[in-house]
Amino acid sequence: MVLTPTRPLLAAAALQRIGRPQEDPVLLLEAALRAVQALMEERGPRMWRRCWIDQPYQREERELIRSELLPSLIRAMQELAEIDQLLICRQPFERSVQVESHRAQMLQGLLDALASGGLQRGG
């Protein structure tokens, strides 16, 4: 079973206004994690060939990756999920601050116009 932190990364990437999913380093990291986990689940004597060295990864190197690299990647994804959650929680607050700031500016403009006689009171 592939265990990854559950995050709506692809849905979020589709909704991004800035950039494209292939430009998102977090999506790249998650894709790498899933690829390594899938390779780890494979059974048999298959060796992992590396393009820059002649010796492929064998059982010993694969076990090092399983015991040392995967836990670090999973922790990194969990920490990124926590950061994302903080940002998601902060968005409505920041939006409401922007709306209230805009309303305050509009009200101040109306008050200034009333004070200068630019608008007539009454109704």
Image: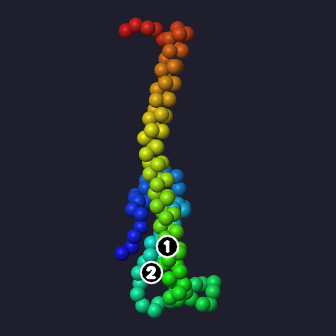
Q: Is residue 56 above or below residue 28?
A: below
Q: Position of residue 120 (x, y in %)?
A: 46, 8
Left or right, 108 with reference to 7: right
Q: Which residue is mark 1?
A: 70
Q: Residue furthest front?
A: 67
Q: Residue at x 39, y 62 (%)?
A: 6
Q: Quadrant of the C terminus?
A: top left
Tell me how the rendering is colored.
rainbow
Distance from disc 2 to disc 1, alpha carbons, whole Å, reads 10 Å
Residue designated by label 2: 40
- Sequence-first disc among 2 and 1: 2
Residue 77: x and y, percent? 48, 63
Residue 65 rendering spot, x and y as whole percentages: 52, 78
Q: Which mark is residue 12?
A: none
Among all residues in the image, which is located at the extreme bottom? 45
Give the residue drawn at x 46%, y 32%.
99
Name the secondary structure under disc 1.
helix
State the image quarter where residue 122 is shown.
top left
Name the one closer to the observer, 40 or 105.
40
Q: Give coordinates of residue 60: x percent, y percent.
A: 53, 87
Sort mark 1 into few (<14), some (14-19) or many (20+) by Cα contacts within 10 Å: some
**Figure label count:** 2
Q: Amino acid at mark 2?
A: Met
- Which kind of residue does numbered mark 1 sit on? Leu
**Residues at circles 2 and 1 in contact by the CB criterion of under 8 Å:** yes
Helix, strand, or loop for circle 2? Answer: helix
Above or below, comparing residue 94 to residue 49 in the picture: above
Q: Residue at x 52, y 52 (%)?
A: 18
For the N terminus, the quadrant is bottom left
Residue appearing at x 52%, y 69% in the figure: 72
Q: Nearer the viewer, residue 87 or 76?
A: 76
